[in-house]
Structures are given as C-alpha cells and as structure tokens.
Image (spheres, rainbow, N blue to C red):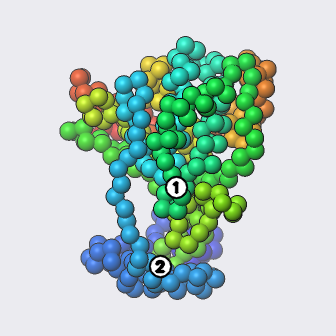
Amino acid sequence: KKIFSKNGLSYNLSEKFKNIPLSNTLEKISKKGCKEFYEGDIAHDMVGSLNKVGGLHSLEDFSKQKTETVNTISSIYKGKTLHQCPPNGPGITVLLMMKMIEKLNIENYKADSAERFHIEAEVTKLAYSIREKNIGDPKFINLDLKNVLSEKAIDEAVKKILMNKCYNVGKLNIPAHPETVYLTVVDKDFNAVSIINSICYAFGSGITTENTGILFQNRGTNFRLEENHPNCIDGLKRPLHTIIPGMVCNNLDQPILSYGVMGGQYQSVGQTHILNNIFDYGMNPQEAISFPRAFHFNDVYQLESGIGDKIENDLKKKGHKTVRNNLYHGGAQAIQIDWQKGLLIGGSDPRKDGFAKGL
C-alpha cells in the first residue's frame, strides 16, 4: 500500500504514479548487472520479504537460477511455418489446433458461420485435452512432441469431430489466469520481435519487497495439485503457463506475421482465430483482430456480443451450451510483413488499450 496507493487511497485517472524504490533497483541492475538481482542486495531483500510472509525461499534458490535460450517448435500450415515457444509454454496448443483445422477445410465455411465456430470449439476441446494430459515442464516428464503433433495423432483427434453435433471431451477443469501484456516490433530491415509478459493477475501475488519495490509475479498458481498430472507442482519445476508470443514465416524463413493474443487460457484459441482470419479468410490484421470471438472453456461456449443470434441458435442445435459474454475475449496485436511491396501492416485490438504505430 505504501507504494501503490496515495496516502492509503487509489490514484485518480491521469495522476502520476512513481515507484521510486523500483527505479533505484533498476538503476542498480544497469550498473552492476543481473548478478546483483540474483545474488546481491536485491536478492537478499526479495528473500527476506518472502520469508516474512511465510515463504520458504532461500538465497540459493535465486543464485541457482539459469536462463535458457531455446529454439521454437513449429509446424506447417498451407506452406507457412508457424513458430511457437516450446513447453513449459502452451504454444503447442496452437500447432495442434491449426493442424486439425487444416484437415477440416475451415475455409469452405463463412468466417461468420455456425460451422466455423463449431469447428473452432471442437478443436479447442480436443487440443486443450491433449495439452492437459501431456504438457508440463519437459525436465520432469517424458514428452515426445513429434508424437503429439504426428499425422497419426492429429487424424485420431479429427475423427472425433462431427459437423452436426458436439464431441464430449469430459470435464477438464482448467483454471483461468488473466493479466498479460503483449507487444510486437518490426524494424526497417523487417527484423521482427514478438514478446509477451505477465505477472499473472493485476498485482501478481500481491507481495512487494520491503526495500526494492519489486512486485512478485504469481505464476506458481498455474500448477496443478493432482498427483501424476504432467503439470503437478514440484520443487525446481516450472509451471505450464498461458503466455505465447507467435510468429509466422514464409518458405524462405522470412517473418510474415508477428503477433500475439493476451487473455489467459484464451490465448491459444485467439491465435488460432486470428491465423484463420488472415490466412483462410483473407482479412488484414486489423480486420482479423476486430472480428467477433468465442471461447469454449470448461464445457461452456462463451460468445462475444458481435456473434449473431442465428449462429448461437445453430450452435445450440449442435449441442453447445452457450452463454453471452458481455465483455470480450483477449486482446491482440499484430504486424504483417509484405516483402514484395515493402509494407508493414499493423493491427491493434479495440478490446484493450493499445495501438499500432509506424515510426
């Protein structure tokens, strides 16, 4: 409260907020390097602050931290390479959904049709079920990505999808986790960066260090408590999370779309929705982002207000339990790169703060 409130009250819109301790901390890191964060005075303050509220953290936990540089996982969709971060991230869910959708020829149905949204719901159920049964920290589970993404596995999943009724995947009971920030940048040479970050909930864990102004994230809440679940909590283990920056490349391995969708568990569906809008329905990034969305989550199909009543009624006839979502699903940003014309085409979601800008 000392840092995030003004004399015990909330700040008003347009008032300046300053976290002076965090400013000092960042300055110290800029001068002494990241070692100061993991082993120096900053680490001591973090450990001490956590211990005071019941945490079992030690300085050794911080000093043993190792950052990993990894390669993407990818699959081909209609001649384009879809890149995602590997587990412990959920990017494989997008690859699964897109591989299923390619076999179902979604482009044969209108973008705003019950058939399109039915397909989206069915592949969501199947892909999320596969994710929940297989994906976690690869250091703790025997994870064969090639097998999960194999043609045989995809064909087995697609066989379960019928166009006239729903497939019952059973209760998944996936926890919801909001609060994410995404941005993408492309420079004059068409080098692209796709970056996403989250402290998991608006104020993360709600714990701020005593002296350094650091607000702790809350990503540990993504763990599951079921024994033998691939994402079951364990020491030194990383949780399966929800945040996934995306990128698409052409057959010359040049980036043609840098994009991401905020929105907790919706992110994989949101990316799939936008990819279909662009590459199957010919929309530009802004059209693809602004287009109405739906999210099948824990046995309920949540529809945005922009989806018509006829579509909802047709979905109900197929067996979907629908609800109208008065808010929105996710928030996206994207930059499409046209190498032939030398153009950058940006889009930003009207559902959230943000904008597309050329400099």
User: Who's the residue at 43% across and 28% down the image?
Assistant: 77
Residue in the picture at 46% in, 55% down: 197
Q: Mark 1 and 2 residues: CB-CB less than 8 Å, in contact? A: no
Q: Amino acid at mark 2?
A: Asp
Q: Residues within 10 Å of mark 2 (few under 14, many from 20)?
A: some
Classify residue 115 by image quadrant: top right
- Name the mark on residue 142: 1
Query: In the image, residue 182 lies at what x, y percent?
Result: 45, 48
Left or right: 65, with 322 as reference point: left
Q: Secondary structure at mark 2?
A: helix
In the structure shown, which secondary structural element does the residue marked by tag 1 occupy? loop
Q: Name above or below for residue 138 compared with residue 39.
A: above
Relative vertical location of residue 189 with respect to residue 57 in this rendering, above or below: above
Q: Give residue 61's mark.
A: 2
Q: Earlier in the sequence, mark 1 or mark 2?
A: 2
Residue at position x 60%, y 30% in the image: 156
Q: Does residue 290 appear anywhere in the picture?
A: no
